[in-house]
């Protein structure tokens, strides 16, 4: 006696127990239905699809279906759930893509600020080095030197029209502030770059698993959107320091 020779009651009981124990899903029943005509008839019975509808879609478990069979009702419920998940997934993808845009914009701004501050540091360093040379030349004028050397040093001193010592102190403080600001920008740049890389990996994972339920993921992404503290510019830092 082969398995196919079993009576309908046993086959019906097997299918019913498989559905109730969550061993058989809608895909399994569809696969069974294409085996032969007999299993197609047994796997399409309303009792099986009613139990499956109750397990998978509890909201529709109490729905009365007089105009439709439970298999058709399950199909419509499945399509609605699929559309809901797709909408949630699309919202989650758009949320992550907007985060990538925000991170990219911040990185561009930080890179620009870092370049400006580095240029300011280089300019300050050159002026500071020139003033140190002027101060050295001014001190050297007090000792005997050959006329040609003395003439060059005197020319360097006469070309400087600002108070040397006070200007050197001001440039020294500005140099320190520039280095501090550059360190702040570099740290902010690294942190923002890390956030961007993490968000890009998250987007890749979402696109690799489009059928996942992203209701929870959308909440997590929403929690990550927090206002960041505004970085102080070098002018603001120097103002606060002077106060």
Image: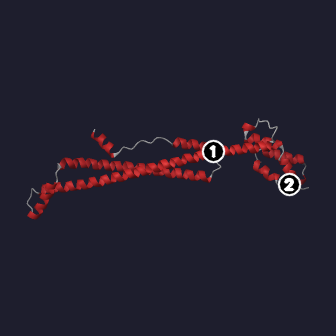
Q: Nearer the viewer, residue 184 or 126?
A: 126
Front of the two marks 2 and 1 = 1
Task: Assign a secondary structure to mark 2.
Answer: loop
Residue 221 in view in this figure: yes
Q: Quadrant of the C terminus?
A: top left
Q: Is residue 69 rendered to the left or right of residue 115?
A: right
- Residue 87's label in the rendered image is 1
- Residue 130, how many percent across, how many down? 21, 56
Residue 20 in view in this figure: no
Q: Say which label, 2 or 1, has the lower sequence index.
A: 2
Residues at marks 2 and 1, CA–CA distance in whole angstroms:
37 Å
Q: Quadrant of the N terminus?
A: bottom right
Which residue is painted at 19% across and 47% down in the image? 166
Give the farthest residue toward the front.
67
- Residue 59, how many percent across, how many down? 72, 37
Q: Is residue 178 rendered to the left or right of residue 70?
A: left
Q: Nearer the viewer, residue 230 or 90?
A: 90
Which residue is painted at 85% across and 54% down in the image? 36
Give the labeled residue for mark 2: 36
């Amino acid at each position: 006696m082969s398995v196919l020779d079993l009576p309908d009651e046993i086959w019906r009981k097997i299918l019913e127990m498989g559905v109730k124990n969550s061993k058989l899903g809608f895909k399994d029943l569809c696969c069974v239905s294409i085996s032969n005509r007999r299993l197609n008839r047994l796997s399409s019975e309303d009792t099986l699809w009613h139990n499956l509808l109750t397990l998978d879609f509890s909201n529709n478990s109490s729905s009365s279906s007089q105009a439709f069979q439970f298999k058709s009702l399950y199909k419509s419920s499945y399509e609605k759930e699929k559309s809901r998940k797709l909408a949630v997934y699309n919202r989650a993808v758009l949320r992550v893509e907007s985060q990538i845009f925000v991170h990219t914009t911040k990185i561009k701004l930080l890179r620009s600020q870092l370049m400006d501050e580095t240029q300011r540091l280089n300019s300050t360093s050159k002026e500071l080095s020139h003033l140190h040379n002027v101060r050295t030349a001014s001190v050297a004028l007090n000792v005997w030197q050959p006329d040609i050397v003395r003439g060059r040093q005197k020319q360097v001193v006469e070309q400087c029209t600002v108070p040397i010592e006070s200007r050197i102190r001001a440039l020294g403080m500005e140099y320190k502030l520039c280095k501090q600001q550059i360190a702040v920008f570099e740290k902010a740049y690294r942190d923002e770059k890390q956030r961007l890389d993490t968000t890009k990996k998250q987007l890749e994972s979402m696109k690799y698993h489009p059928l996942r339920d992203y209701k929870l993921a959308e909440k997590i992404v929403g929690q990550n959107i927090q206002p960041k503290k505004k970085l102080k510019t070098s002018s603001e830092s120097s103002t606060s320091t002077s106060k």
